[in-house]
Image (cartoon, rainbow, N blue to C red):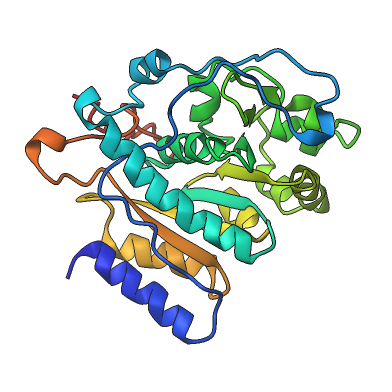
Amino acid sequence: MSLIELALQRVKADSAKGTAEKGPANAGQSSSGGTSVRTEAALPASVAAEPREPEIFITEAFLREKGLLAPESHEHQQRAEYRHIKYGLLREISRQGGHGLIFVTSALQGEGKSFSSMHLALSLASEQDYTVVLVDADVIRPSVSRILGCEDRPGLMNALADTGTSVESLILPTNVRGLSFLPAGRHEERATEFFSSARMAEISRQLLSVPNRIVVVDTLPLLLTTESRALASLGGQIVLVVRAESTPQNAVLEAIDVLGEGANVKLLLNASVRAKALEYYGFGHGYDYTTNNNTTNTKKQP
């Protein structure tokens, strides 16, 4: 029995005990849906009265340059796999009456969670009935902010630290219709306390107050930090990214335990290799959440 099968068996066992529904979102490879880039900028309905020019430009050439697309011969497979994951999440959102809060996390570093966050956001943004805000809550290693050139822009932590700051004012429009981005913002040593605060709950409500908006949050690894555990308490769906042939089985099961019996957990298998010709990995750089600068190197896209 494979690592993922064992983890899924555990999730199903929890569900049988009367916990919230938990179903696997299992992609055979790192993949992407809805990556066709549109030139039209879209803003949430509440702030659309004053159109803003895109501040972030995402093109296929940009994604390829950053190592975020599979080889051209496998792009269709990419899109199909993330589309499969997306519709499982959308069904849950529909059952919850449009409560579109999705946290993307992992047990350990280097599993591809930020890669998955970006592609989920892109795929969801291609839906005509929704808008998407991608939030970088990885305040220790804000990879998405760095990739999008927004590492020094104010963002989530600024809104948390300053109650007079409107979180909506910090959201940056992109050239992709329906997609906007909230950077991680300032560095803050007390991130866990901020994420556990009433202010964070208020910001979450504000973000979700826009009709038909989905909020995709890239969080930190569950077993290496405490910040993502605090965020998970806000509810919503949790996508746990598991790296094939890499993530230890006990780490997956421990991460599920950390989230608790009531958590709505989905599993996403990343970087599975079906054949040598289909090898595909996510980010070409590792994370380091330790104090000894001992990074985990991951392979880049061929």
Most distant residue in the left direction: 276
Which of 162 and 276 lies nearest the eye of the viewer? 276
Q: Residue at x 33, y 45 (%)?
A: 81
Task: Give the residue drawn at x 52%, y 35%.
Answer: 126
Residue 193 position (above or below residue 294)? below
Q: Which residue lies furthest to the right in this view?
A: 164
Q: Residue 9: x percent and y percent?
A: 32, 75
- For the N terminus, which image quadrant? bottom left
Within the image, what quadrant is residue 53 found in? top right
- Quarter of the image with the C terminus is top left
User: What residue is rendered at 10% in x and 34% in y?
Assistant: 277
Q: In this view, does 221 lie to the left or right of 92?
A: left
Q: Where is residue 300 in the image (x, y as percent from the top left)?
A: 25, 26
- Report the residue at 51% width, 28% height from top: 144
In the rendered image, the residue lying farthest to the bottom is 17
> On the image, which quarter does residue 159 sit in?
top right
Relative to 189, residue 39 above or below: above
Question: How many badges with numbers are in the image?
Answer: 0
Above or below — where is 283 with respect to 40?
A: below
Q: Give coordinates of residue 151: x percent, y percent.
A: 59, 20
Q: Is residue 265 left or right of residue 270?
A: right
Residue extending furthest toward the front: 128
Tell me if I can see residue 224 in this picture: no
Relative to 10, is 88 on the left or the right? right
Query: Residue 269: percent from the left, percent from the top?
Result: 31, 52
Residue sitting nearer the eye, 70 or 33? 33
Residue 143 in view: yes
